[in-house]
Image (spheres, rainbow, N blue to C red):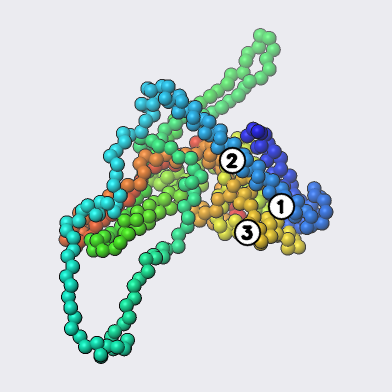
Amino acid sequence: MRTYEQVNKELAAKSKTLHEVFEEAGPEMDFDKVRSLEGDTGAKVEKVRELNKELEALGIERDRLAEMGDASRKAAEWDSTLNHPQTEKLSAGPEKKEEKRTLGQLFIESKAAETKHTVRKLDIDVKTLFETAAGWDPEATRIPRVELYPLAPIAVVDVIPMGNTGMDTIKYMKESTFTNLAAEAAAGTTYGEAALVYTETSDEVEKIGVWLPVTDEQLEDVAGLESLLNQRLTYMLRARLCSQILVGTGRSGGTPDLVGTLDLAAIQTQDKGSDATPDAFYKAMTLVRATGFAEPSICIVHPNDWQDIRLLTTADGIYIFGSPSDAGPERLWGVPVLQTTAVTENTGIVGDYRGYSMLFMRRGIEFQVTNAHSDFFIKGKQAIRCDMRCSMVHFRDTAFCSVTSI
């Protein structure tokens, strides 16, 4: 089986080859100008598609090998923890709390009494009511389906490594100065003096919350309200978290925002300029590799921007990323693409989230219910509160690059 390094080296070589093709074609996508490939435009586009498929396969293989490496490291960490009880005690989070009941269970347990129903008879002459216009409407039962408001799927959280913390601040040491004066030295001469400086860095644990007013009657009378409230309020928190991970202004604006990728102090930037969009992303990946010394794990793109990439054609109208009948690759230069509206349109992100970021959870999503808010007690209302506490940490700013003006 090939190693991660071998696969990564082959992927980089094929990416470079494909990048050269796009550079030769230029922003007009004129494949007649391409000299690195042989044949007519159709043959050249077919070769590009073959390279895309090879890059996709290599990317999948690299991701699989990276996951195996992560699993191996985690196993080693667990083994170290189990063999060093004192370390386990220091690294453990807060004590496990009593298992929490669901929102619906709390509502059911809080009922004072069941409603009693009485059967009543209605004495009317049906002969005058056999017409709809006369007031006898046919019975209509509402179907159980609830059509929810159209909302974007939660995706960003799924590509970010996650960890737990028992602290209110994530602190770690960052090597801020690295001066390497290693050099050849003749006998009896002075060695070059190196310099290393370490700086304590911290990211605050922040809270994301939302609440919803509900009447007692709704809670008592509407079947399935437990699952509906759990689902919708949870979605609201996770959707906000996805946005904060990418565009939160915790670095420039401070608390209570999280530190989003686009707000990093030293994030790299690649402007599209006159390049084709795939070329701009390739140059961003090069910046991550050559300056950040990291390996991009994901490209994050707004769906409207990905549409422009997917519909790229040559000067004579041939689709570059596959015909409309093909699903097409969800990768750029072998790196997976995540389409999300959580990132600003016309701005993309390339980054090594796998190696240099982590979402620390201080506390997961919790629900609390009260009728003590305002005049809710005398009006028969309940306030349902939902919140979570977390911190988004980017360990190396230069491992991330924004792609602008796409």
Residue that mark 3 sits on: 308
Task: Kindly report the distance in space between the C-alpha atoms of the residues bearing marks 3 and 1.
Answer: 17 Å
**Which residue reaches farthest right?**
39
Query: Which residue corresponds to the image point at 69% horizontal and 49% vertical from the top-left?
Result: 52
Q: What residue type is labelled 3?
A: Asp
Is disc 2 surrounded by few (<14), some (14 to 19) or many (20+) residues within 10 Å?
some
Q: Determine whether 211 is above or below 162 in the image.
A: below
Viewer-proximal residue among 77 and 244? 77
Q: Residue 49 carries which label?
A: 1
Q: What residue type is labelled 2?
A: Asp
Residue that mark 2 sits on: 63
Viewer-proximal residue among 146 and 269? 146
What is the quadrant of residue 181 in the picture?
Answer: top right
Q: Determine whether 247 is above or below 136 in the image.
A: above
Query: Which residue corresponds to the image point at 36% horizontal and 33% vertical from the top-left?
Result: 93
- Dot placed on the residue nearer the N-terminal end, 3 or 1: 1
What is the quadrant of residue 14 in the picture?
Answer: top right
Q: Secondary structure beneath disc 1?
A: helix
**Which residue reaches farthest top?**
188
